[in-house]
Structures are given as structure tokens and as C-alpha cells.
Amino acid sequence: MRYISTRGGASPQTFTDILLEGLAPDGGLYMPQAVPRFTAAELDRMRGLDYADLAFEIVSRFAPEWDATDLRACVRRAYSAARFGDVAITPLHTLEPDLHLLRLSNGPTLAFKDVAMQLLGELFESLLVRRGEGLNILGATSGDTGSAAEYAMRGKRGVRVFMLSPEGRMSPFQAAQMYSLQDANIHNIAIRGVFDDCQDIVKLIGADAPFKARHQIGTVNSINWARVAAQVVYYFRGWFAATTRNDQSVSFAVPSGNFGNIYAGWVARAMGLPVRRLIVATNENNVLEEFFRTGRYRVRDAAEVHYTSSPSMDISKSSNFERYMFDMVDADPARLRELWSAIDRTGAFDISGTPLFDAVRASGFVAGASTHADRLDTIRRVDARHGMVIDPHTANAVATGLRLREPDERLLCLETALPAKFADTIREALGHDPDRPSGYDRIESLPQRVTVLDADAAQVRRYIEEHAQ
Ligand SMILES: *Cc1c(COP(=O)(O)O)cnc(C)c1O
């Protein structure tokens, strides 16, 4: 099993080689040369496995060189009832026959990014300890990703996290989640500015190769293949939970932004999971919906991004989408480069009316976009009909999933966050606050640990020099 770049300019690498890297050196994304496929007999056997054992079966196919005993220990630590509050890790909640929520939000930060990030934390520590190396993770966050990374890396040997966030611009709950961490290896840096200032500083420091090398600076971003591999697991898990036999197919409706979550569903299907359709659900930032509807993929500039009530899906372009298009052009890096150079030149590519778009249409994806009003309406409807409060991201999936659902289709809508994180929208929809899971009721009053700096890369650089390992 070797990994190559979508742009064709990197020599084949192992899973272990690429684990700590971001983009390939040629600017592409790493892809396995071939996706392993499970036989019917293997699927039968996997049906009875618990989450950690299932994760081992799947992730080990992508990382065959990783010591099996160590990988088993990693998945056991990552996927425990203690960390996810439920032995099922990603339990299936049935709303009515053939309509389910696959609940991915039981991890420490109450959002689906925990599922992959918790495993990443274990793999990073294992690899760094084995190599006797250290890693300083530098990132910028407006909420979800940063906190999932901090909760995955807290207390891990060999890892320090430097997470930049805009001072005073996250919800009190989100800020408290991050800033209340007291682990010595977690450094919260609140920047006097907005999220873009944080991201600019990370980019500036990231472009300084000597500084990066000197301080072993790395990132945790959504294009890491290990995250995709970890996310494949809950697609299998959801299918096993919603069916009794291997000839029964399901469809998944997925609240999408960077296309990482739903891309894992596509990989699961390539591995033998009987997926009928993958339903891409976007909010007003409909880059993906527009592409699957028209064949035109047009990235947005910052001024065009809508700030919505499902903020973790507010994107201008979809980074993992490049992986899907690489599959669609039959892994031909020259064709992929053509498409992406059109994006660089004109901000878009258009394959409408071509055989390539016919292939996209036949690939099993459909897409729909929802508005704020749709989400409010869906939150009210699910509450009234099923007595369950869903968050605004999940509401995008339920709204689009129900709208596009075909007769006799078994539909799993992916729940990507708990409503407790988005109290304002829940209050607007239902007139009352969402419940908080136990253990989170007084999070805002816990002592906080955060350093405030100006929006100045030099100050951040100095802070890293003083605190990096
Ligand atoms: C990140 C995120 C998404 C979008 O997932 P992608 O993998 O970027 O498509 C949806 N919902 C929530 C709550 C998220 O945090």
C-alpha cells in the first residue's frame, strides 16, 4: 500500500511516511494507489465487531506496515466508551423505519471531527515516541477544528499544540472548551483580531521553511489521509446497524463543507459497502451543490462566503473535493492538473456537457442546499415529530435528505454536532435552550488558560520559540 499525489509529482510513500505531513510537495493531496476491497465473507465477519475492532480492520488495510499490536492499542484507546460516552461510539438513532440519524457527536468536543482526531492523536504519539521526535502543531481556528485537535493531542508525548483563535469572537461555550484545558502541551493563543488574521499568521509562519524545520512545525488539517481512513469506519458501522443482511443497501445524507466526511463514504463504497447514494447537503455556501447540479465548480472569494447558522460548513472551496475528481479522471494526474490550473487561472472549471460530467452524474452523488429558514423548519419538525433536538449542521442533512429521498430508500442522516454548541439557533427555532450533556453544564466558569497576543506574526513566532519543544 503506497500513497501518491493527485498532482503526480511525489514518489510513492507509506501511510507512516505521510501521517505527519500536510499537502504533498507538489501541492496535491495524498491518495492510496489502490483502495482495498472487502470480500462478502469478510463483511459477514465484520458485522459482529465492536467499534475499535472494526476500526482496526479498516485502518490496518491502509497502514499495513504499522505494527498490528500497536495499532490495536491505538484504536482501543481512541474508541472507548469513556471518551465517547457510549459503547457504540457512533450509535444509530432510528427516527422512523428506514430513517435514521448516525450520531457522530459524542466525543469530547461534541462534534464529528473528534471521531477521526481522537485516533490521529494516538497515531501521532505512537509514531513520535517510536522515532524519538517532537512535533509542534500550529493551527488557526474559529471553533470546531481547533478544539477537536486540542482534545485529541492533550497530554500526548512528543506533541505540543499552538492554536490561534480570534479573541472574543467565538461563542462563550466554544472559548471555554478550548481555554479551560490545563494540559501543559496545549497553548491557546487568542489573537487581537479576526479569524483571517489568525489564518494569515499561520500561513506566514508556514511559508518560513527554515523556521518550520528548526521548530518541527506541523499541522492537523482536513486533508490528512488518516482522517479520511478513520471516518470510513462509521460508514460501515452505520450500515451494519441499519441492516440485517449484506445485500441491503443504504444512502447517507452528509452535511458537507470541505468534503472530508462524505468523501470517506465514497471510499467506504469503493471498499465494498453497498451504498445506494451519497447525498451532499450544503448550506447557503453551495460550491458543492452547484457542481453536482451544473458541472461547474467555482470557488468563492472571501467576500462571497455567507456567515450562516451552520458555521462549520461556511467554506469558499472544498479541499477534499480534489480527491474525488482524481478518482473521476481515473487517477490521471495530468487531467487533474488541467482542472486545477483552470481554478488557479479563472477561479473555476466547467465540465458540463462532457463525458466526465456524465461519469460524475453516474457516480452515485446527489446534492441539495438548505437555507436558514429550512434549517429552523427542520429543527422544529424533527423535534415535533420525533421528540429530538438536532443541531443546525445536522438539520442541513435531514432537510436535503428528506427532500431528495426516493421510495424504499434506507436513509442515514449524519449528525455532526450536538445542539448544545449552537444555543442561539436552537432558541430561535424552538424558543428554549438546548440541553447540555452532563459534565458541560458549568464549562464557562472553569478557570481558563490563554495567552493574548497582537495580530503580529513576530509575536507569535517569539512565543513559539519560547515554548516549542
Ligand atoms: C467540519 C464540519 C462539517 C463539514 O464536514 P466536511 O468534512 O468539511 O465536509 C459539518 N458539520 C460540522 C459540525 C463540522 O464540524
Image (spheres, rainbow, N blue to C red):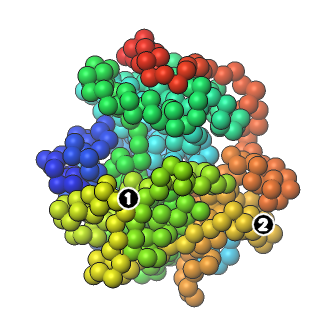
Q: Is residue 113 above or below residue 250?
A: above
Gap in Å between the C-alphas at discs 2 and 1? 38 Å
Which residue lies under the disc numbered 2? 380
Residue at 44% across, 29% down: 201
User: Can residue 235 be seen here?
Assistant: no
Is the residue indicated by label 2 positioned so its CB lies within 8 Å of ligand 1? no
**Identity, as a three-letter code, of the amino acid under mark 2:** Arg
Q: Position of residue 177 (x, y in %)?
A: 64, 34
Q: Nearer the viewer, residue 292 or 204?
A: 204
Q: Is residue 362 above or below residue 338?
A: below
Please say whether residue 184 is visible from this viewpoint: yes
Kind of element beneath mark 2 = helix
Residue that sits furthest to the right in the current view:
431
- How many marks on residues? 2
Q: Nearer the viewer, residue 182 or 281?
A: 281
Q: Quadrant of residue 216?
A: top left
Residue type, mark 1 in image: Gly
- The x and y percentages for residue 51 are 47, 54
Which one is earlier in the sequence, the residue at label 2 or at label 1?
Answer: 1
- Observer-side mark, 2 or 1, equals 1
Q: Which residue is depicted at the point 30% across and 26% down?
A: 208
Tell me the crowding category of disc 2: few under 14, some 14 to 19, or many 20 or more residues within 10 angstroms, Cα based. many
Count neighbours of disc 1 (C-alpha within 10 A) and say few if under 14, some if 14 to 19, many if 20 or more: some
* Viewer-nearest residue: 271 or 8: 8
Q: Residue at x 66, y 66 (%)?
A: 371
Q: Quadrant of the C terminus?
A: top left
The circle on residue 231 is: none
**Residue ID at (21%, 46%):** 26
Q: Point out residue 406 in the picture as x, y percentages from the top left corner.
A: 55, 85
Which quadrant, please, contains the N terminus?
bottom left
Most extreme residue toward the bottom is: 407
Q: What residue did someone put label 1 on? A: 347
